Image (tube, rainbow, N blue to C red):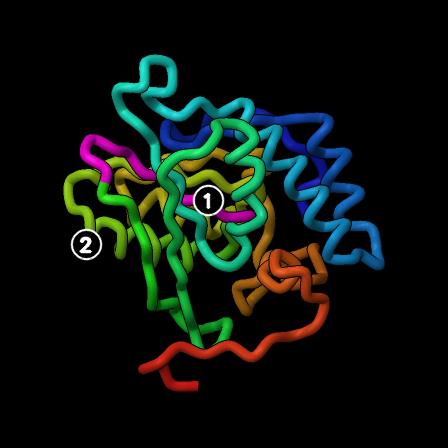
């Protein structure tokens, strides 16, 4: 994985927030063996650093609220850091599903607050191939229309492939991250972690049975 975070101004819709403390926490996260509880603690701390450096639009005067949408399953790791940073308020979830990792995800469930004047932020732990974020952005645009003209994508770990895909395919996507140049393997998984972030988000170090009605297994 990317060894150190560093500033980058390669694209106007990419905002990198480098942090030496986040680099240290990332090193601890990657130490083997890693338990779900340890990973959750480290990722929450990393997310807290990122959110502290990102101010939601309208936060200072309250005129344009930003509604966080947590992308299941890994995005659940960022729920508590968001709550700690900005307090309670309208929140939503999006649930992408795919029959195998190489397939394109389909968002099979969403719960998005229909808040007048709101802007939306997608939260997840990692942006690897970019296909999950792309599906989430497109679904959001289909459902809320013009209010999705800008979508803040808040994700600590960003791979080059997913970054380039999202910025190219979603003109309204603005990526906020700490690491922006991670690598992706041929199967679309991010190189380095060695564990399933989605499983760890639910406290599970094994595998889970997953299904979506209407989707082939």
| Residue 121 on the magenta span | yes
Task: Give the position of the C terminus as an image quadrant.
Answer: bottom left
SS at mark 2 in the image: helix
The correct choice, above or below, for 24 with respect to 159 in the image is above
Q: Residue under circle 1?
A: 123
Task: Locate residue 166 relative to residue 23 in the image: left or right.
Answer: left
Residue in view at x 56 percent, y 79 percent: 209
How crowded pointer 2 is (Cα within 10 Å; few <14, some 14-19, many 20+) is rated as few
How crowded pointer 1 is (Cα within 10 Å; few <14, some 14-19, many 20+) is rated as many
Q: CA distance from mark 1 to mark 2?
A: 18 Å
**Mark number, residue 30:** none
Question: Is any part of residue 199 visible from this angle?
Answer: yes
Q: Quadrant of residue 152?
A: top left
Question: Is any part of residue 121 visible from this angle?
Answer: no
**Residue 110 x %, y %:** 32, 58
**Residue 24 x %, y %:** 77, 34
Residue in view at x 35 percent, y 37 percent: 67
**Residue 96 x %, y %:** 40, 64
SS at mark 1 in the image: strand
Q: Nearer the viewer, residue 63 or 33?
A: 63
Q: Which residues are magenta?
A: 115-125
| Residue 105 on the magenta span | no
Q: Choose the circle earlier in sequence order: 1 or 2.
A: 1
Residue in view at x 61 percent, y 60 percent: 202
Q: Nearer the viewer, residue 34 or 167?
A: 34
Residue in view at x 37 percent, y 48 percent: 92
Q: Residue under circle 2?
A: 142
The correct choice, above or below, for 197 with respect to 166 in the image is below
Q: Quadrant of residue 6?
A: top right
Tally of marks = 2
Task: Locate residue 19 relative to residue 154 in the image: left or right.
Answer: right
Task: Locate residue 190 relative to residue 27 in the image: left or right.
Answer: left
């Amino acid at each position: 994985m990317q060894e150190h975070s560093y500033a980058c101004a390669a694209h106007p819709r990419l905002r990198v927030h480098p942090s030496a403390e986040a680099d240290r926490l990332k090193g601890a996260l990657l130490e083997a063996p890693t338990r779900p509880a340890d990973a959750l603690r480290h990722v929450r701390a990393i997310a807290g650093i990122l959110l502290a450096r990102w101010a939601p639009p309208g936060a200072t005067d309250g005129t344009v609220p930003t509604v966080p949408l947590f992308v299941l399953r890994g995005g659940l790791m960022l729920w508590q850091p968001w709550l700690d940073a900005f307090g309670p308020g309208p929140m939503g979830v999006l649930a992408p599903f795919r029959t195998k990792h190489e397939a394109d995800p389909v968002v099979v469930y969403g719960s998005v607050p229909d808040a007048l004047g709101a802007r939306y932020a997608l939260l997840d732990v990692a942006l690897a191939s970019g296909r999950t974020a792309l599906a989430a952005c497109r679904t959001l645009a289909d459902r809320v229309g013009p209010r999705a003209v800008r979508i803040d994508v808040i994700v600590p770990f960003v791979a080059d492939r997913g970054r380039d895909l999202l910025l190219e395919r979603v003109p309204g996507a603005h990526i906020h991250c700490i690491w922006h140049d991670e690598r992706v393997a041929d199967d679309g998984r991010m190189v380095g972690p060695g564990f399933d972030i989605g499983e760890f988000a639910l406290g599970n170090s094994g595998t889970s049975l997953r299904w979506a009605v209407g989707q082939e297994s």
